[in-house]
Amino acid sequence: MRRITPAGPEHGQAIAIAVERLREARTLLRQAGARQAASAAGKAISSAEGAARHVQHRIRRTTQ
């Protein structure tokens, strides 16, 4: 099995902050009428949420 790069809680917190800010940006883009940019922000949110799941797995695996 491949070795997993260690991750700590600070990595999870950083991603959570990024997701929160992306959501704020998407809301502002919608208010500004920038539909395509808001859609792109939504895709970025999905990607960041996937990264959050990934880092949570890394945290679980490296703290056992």
Image (cartoon, rainbow, N blue to C red):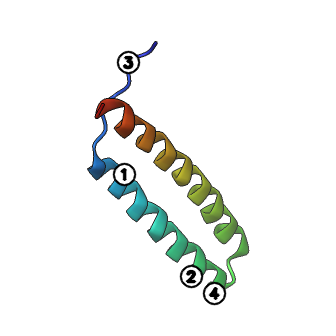
Contact check, label 1 and label 3, Cβ < 8 Å: no
Mark 2: secondary structure: helix
Q: CA distance from mark 4 to mark 3?
A: 44 Å
The mark found on residue 22 in the picture is: none
Q: CA distance from mark 1 to mark 3?
A: 19 Å
Report the residue marked by disc 1.
Answer: 12
Q: 48 or 38: nearer the eye? A: 48
The mark found on residue 31 in the picture is: 4
Mark 1: secondary structure: helix
- Give percent across and percent down for residue 45: 57, 59
- Give percent across and percent down for residue 19: 48, 62
Looking at numbered disc 2 in the image, what kind of residue is underneath it? Leu
The mark found on residue 28 in the picture is: 2
Q: 13 or 61: nearer the eye? A: 61
Farthest-out residue, bottom: 31
Contact check, label 4 and label 3, Cβ < 8 Å: no
Looking at numbered disc 3 in the image, what kind of residue is underneath it? Arg
- Disc 3 crowd rating (10 Å Cα; few below 14, some 14-19, many 20+) is few
Contact check, label 2 and label 3, Cβ < 8 Å: no
Q: CA distance from mark 4 to mark 1?
A: 29 Å
Mark nearer the viewer, 4 or 3: 3
Mark nearer the viewer, 1 or 2: 1
Q: Residue at x 37, y 31 (%)?
A: 61
Please say if 1 is above or below 57.
Answer: above
Q: Quadrant of the C terminus?
A: top left
User: In the rendered structure, which disc, 4 or 1, sits on the residue that comes first in sequence?
Assistant: 1
- Disc 1 crowd rating (10 Å Cα; few below 14, some 14-19, many 20+) is some
